[in-house]
Image (cartoon, grey):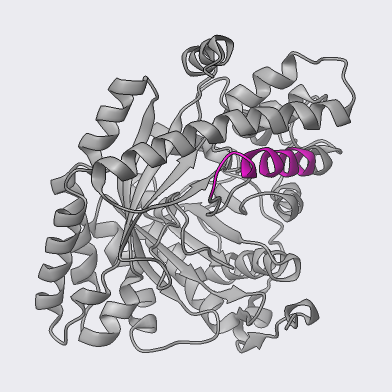
Amino acid sequence: MINTKDILETINMIDNENLDIRTITMGISLLSCADSDAKRAAEKVYDKITRSAEGLVAAGERIERTYGIPIINKRISVTPVSMLAAASGGDPTVYARTMDRAAKELGVNFIGGYSALVHKGFSAGDRELIASIPEALSETEFVCSSVNIGSTKSGINMDAVALMGEAVVRTARLTADRSCIGAAKLVVFMNAPEDNPFMAGAFHGPGEPDLVLNVGVSGPGVVRAAVAKHPDADLSVIADVIKKTAFKITRMGQLVGTVASDMLGVPFGIVDLSLAPTPAVGDSVAHILEEMGLETCGVPGTTAALALLNDAVKKGGVMASSHVGGLSGAFIPVSEDAGMIDAARDGTLTVEKLEAMTAVCSVGLDMIIIPGDTTAETVSAIIADEAAIGMVNSKTTAVRVIPAIGKNVGDELEFGGLLGSGPVMKLNDAKSSARFVRRGGRIPAPLQSLKN
């Protein structure tokens, strides 16, 4: 039976509390496009992407009109391109340019999958793709890139970590005239999921079907508003309030995914029930934590409050969808979260505190702006630290840091849109990590990986 109160509550969430579907992302397998000739393969890629996703944007817009639910992004993820590069050889950037051309033709916001999976070592095409990432991201507008450098089962590939530190710095330098935007489209993963709908880390995993539709929900403003209605409640009550709210948010994602799947004739994959913030006032994960009683995000107690939030979101959301996947938790991307931006500006929120917070949330050190003279070895060491947290805790972690070329601590970098803006944050890099990073090899998998 339809409950009028629930309908009115959802309308209020959309109108006043920034509730939206952050993304519907179509995953497309490109394995059938492999060819020994890169140009032929690239044309097959273009044809398959444009044919498979030709109705994606129109379907999203139709759902918005029919149900009144904002769908902020329509996106595409594809098979890790290094697999195609392995078959064709040559310069992998031909695939990046092809992906960008297809994204422009379809009108989607981003296309992800300029990626490689190197958690246990390099296969054919992997090194070539990693080396090409800076050029690929500097020459394209919509392409996003990710590399998985480790897993709990395999350990951490430190040779890949060293290469990715160099790739991040070079990508920032090549796009310095555009606020270093290339680095904001590059993610380094530990335990990367194959069905993540969120950029910049989305790729279509080898274990996925030929086509699939995944949905990413949002709603930190809704959760903050729900917590605000209980100013004197204890934390057990707050956890229950968040669970119930997450259930409602995720049910909306399930509805959108089901309808979009039927419209497009594409299997419905998962709902990623992550709380994805924006720079808009009232749509901040940091503000949820502050509503719980923290004066500012980053003070002592922040990690505990975030752990409560993340756990409650998962418990509530998993009951609302047949298939939950992706990242599913509370995101803490600094430049994309109004509360995080303010806390970073006043110095309360530090990179070290953010690293501690990543042990209990999704996904990692995300959209953090660092000094432009940061060395590649320091970036690699940051990646290694974050990967270690993911490895030992059997969770997905990631690093998306932006070296702000020509800027120092306290300066600001502006991206615009959902990527937001933020201050250049101080790093604890007075002493070098270079010798550690240059050792290479693999950090072995932890004992808890032996579960069979």
The residue at the point 21 percent across, 35 percent down is 58
The residue at the point 17 percent across, 83 percent down is 35
Tell me, yes or no, if residue 431 can be seen here: no
**Res 224 quadrant in image:** top right
The percent position of residue 451, horizontal first and vertical second, equals 75, 80
Segment tinted magenta in the rendering: 306-322
In the rendered structure, the answer to whether residue 359 lies left or right of residue 145 reads: right
**Res 238 quadrant in image:** top right
- Residue 239, above or below 350: above
Q: Is residue 148 magenta?
A: no
Tell me, yes or no, if residue 389 can be seen here: yes
Q: Is residue 312 magenta?
A: yes
In the rendered structure, the answer to whether residue 422 lies left or right of residue 99 reads: right
Which quadrant would the C terminus be assigned to in this image? bottom right
In the rendered structure, the answer to whether residue 212 lies left or right of residue 423 reads: left
- Residue 27, above or below 116: above
The residue at the point 46 percent across, 63 percent down is 168
- Residue 8, above or below 289: above
**Res 125 quadrant in image:** bottom left
Q: Nearer the viewer, residue 422 or 366?
A: 366
The percent position of residue 79, horizontal first and vertical second, equals 33, 68
The percent position of residue 371, horizontal first and vertical second, equals 55, 52
Which quadrant would the N terminus be assigned to in this image? top right
Q: Nearer the viewer, residue 2 or 127?
A: 2
The residue at the point 30 percent across, 66 percent down is 210
The percent position of residue 96, horizontal first and vertical second, equals 24, 64
In the rendered structure, the answer to whether residue 173 lies left or right of residue 151 reads: left
Q: Nearer the viewer, residue 202 or 130?
A: 202
